[in-house]
Amino acid sequence: MVDSTVGTGGGEPESSDSLRTFGAVIQGLREHAGLSREEFGDLVRFSKHTVASVELGRRMPDVTFVERADEALGNTGALRKAAGKLARQPGLAAWFRHWAQLESAAITLYTYECRLVPGLLQTEAYARTLFTNQLPPLDDEQIETQWAARAERQRLLRERPNTAFGFILEEHLFLRRTGGVEVTRELIDHVLQIAELRNVEMQIMPVVRETHAGLDGPMRLLETPENTWFAYCEGQRGGQLVSDSKELSILQRRYARMRAQALGFEDSVRLLERMRGAL
């Protein structure tokens, strides 16, 4: 089976019962304290618009918001505990959410990327460069939500040491210098640091390569704890989740060929270090 669903941009995903309930509790405690949204926003150092979005269940509150809100509303610890039960991952488009659920439990996750450094490896500065240049434009709140989602997903790399992560990245992703020299330096340093993790395999596909098996575009492959494989291919405005065994076999063979065509780990690290030194 090949599932194809099309996204509609980078806006907020749907709300959830847990988010709406959490927001209602915040609102009830705020009103009991006799605070307007603006007054409460001043206490927690967030705008009244952010407070409204949280109370209405439209926004996943970040850790800082929860900590400050709990302190401002009695410091009972109840909000901190409740925040841990919130179900929605913020900033994930509906067409990506199914893949993200599979990804969170995967035992193997392979990524080939030729357009931009994948989200699991991005620095905050690199990610914000992408968000601020997105079309149609995102507002400040959407950008914060998008980054919160990306940062949350990145925890997979360190919190799942028994998951095997493999990345094949095109050399030109770093040569482009997205965000400028300083952003690129920080990005390369970050990727090199991630490459030191025992469960991560990092390879660079060199620019000077007459051909390779991934020219049809980016792909991601994952294996579930039940040893079932899925693939995900993303385009300009949507993504395609692939579960058909014949299609998966083709993508797996292509990824396997690319692993042989890309630079090995040590050569990849040396190339990244040379690019870092040339900046």
Image (cartoon, rainbow, N blue to C red):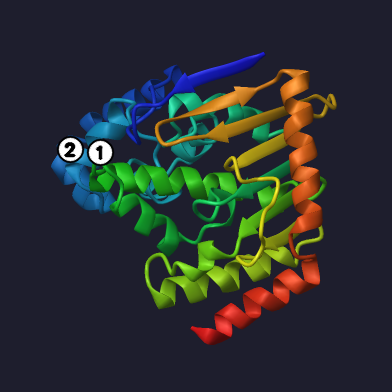
Instruction: Look at the numbered disc 2 and give the secondary structure of its residue.
Output: helix
Residue at 33% across / 41% down in the picture? Answer: 73
Q: Position of residue 241 (x, y in %)?
A: 60, 24
Say whether residue 7 is left or right of residue 200.
Answer: left
Q: Nearer the viewer, residue 261 or 227?
A: 261
Residue at 67% across / 13% down in the picture? Answer: 1
Say whether residue 149 is left or right of residue 164.
Answer: left
**How busy is the neighbourhood of tag 1: few (under 14 within 10 Å), some, or many (20 plus)?**
many
Residue at 32% across / 28% down in the picture? Answer: 58
Residue 158 drawn above or below residue 96 = below
| Mark seen at residue 51 | 1
The answer to whether marks 2 and 1 mark residues whose Cβ atoms lie closer than 8 Å is yes
Instruction: Look at the numbered disc 1 and give the secondary structure of its residue.
Output: helix
Residue 30 drawn above or below residue 270 = above
Q: Position of residue 31 (x, y in %)?
A: 21, 30
Q: Nearer the viewer, residue 88 or 25?
A: 88
| Of labels 2 and 1, the one closer to you | 1
Q: Which residue is identified by label 2?
A: 37
The type of residue carrying mark 1 is Val
Q: Earlier in the sequence, mark 2 or mark 1?
A: 2
Q: Position of residue 198 (x, y in %)?
A: 81, 60
| Mark seen at residue 105 | none
Residue 72 appears in view: no
